[in-house]
Image: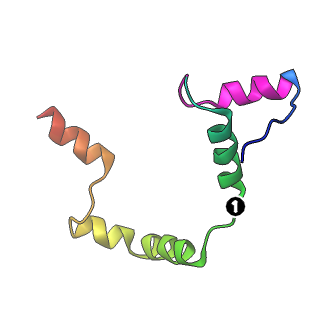
Amino acid sequence: MTTTIQISESLQDQLIQRKLFKGESYEDVIWDLVEDSLELSEETKRHIQEYEKNSEKWFKEGKFKRLEQIKKEKAL
């Protein structure tokens, strides 16, 4: 079911500024805003903690590359 809502011109201007591309719908913009305010799941929080704990080790093991390293490789 779709519905129509009324918004002020200033809010519409704000939504327009938040569009990532010209054809993006207002619904997509609003969903992006809602998503940004949601609490991270416990699983996501665990993944972030694991990354923070192990990232240096993973880089040294070659599992990941830093952006600077990729730029150097592409320049060669």
Residue 13 falls inside the magenta stretch: yes
Neighbourhood count class around disc 1 (C-alpha, 10 Å): few under 14, some 14–19, many 20 upward: few
Which residue lies most toward the front here?
A: 1
Which residue lies most toward the left here?
A: 76
Quarter assignment of residue 15? top right
Residue 9, compared with residue 71, is above or below; it is above
Residue 14 falls inside the magenta stretch: yes
- Specify whether 48 is left or right of 8: left
Quarter assignment of residue 13? top right
Front-most of residues 72 and 11? 11
Quadrant containing the C terminus is top left
The secondary structure that most of the magenta stretch takes on is: helix
Specify start and end residues of the magenta stretch as a single range: 10-22
Residue 48, compared with residue 70, is above or below; it is below
- Specify whether 32 is left or right of 57: right
Q: Position of residue 6 (x, y in %)?
A: 87, 31
Q: Residue at x 26, y 55 (%)?
A: 65
Q: Position of residue 40 (x, y in %)?
A: 63, 68
The amino acid type, in three-letter code, at marker 1 is: Leu
Front-most of residues 41 and 7? 7
Q: Position of residue 31 (x, y in %)?
A: 66, 47
Q: Position of residue 55 (x, y in %)?
A: 38, 68
Q: Residue at x 53, y 27 (%)?
A: 21
Q: Residue at x 53, y 71 (%)?
A: 44
* Residue linked to disc 1: 38
Q: Residue at x 78, y 41 (%)?
A: 3
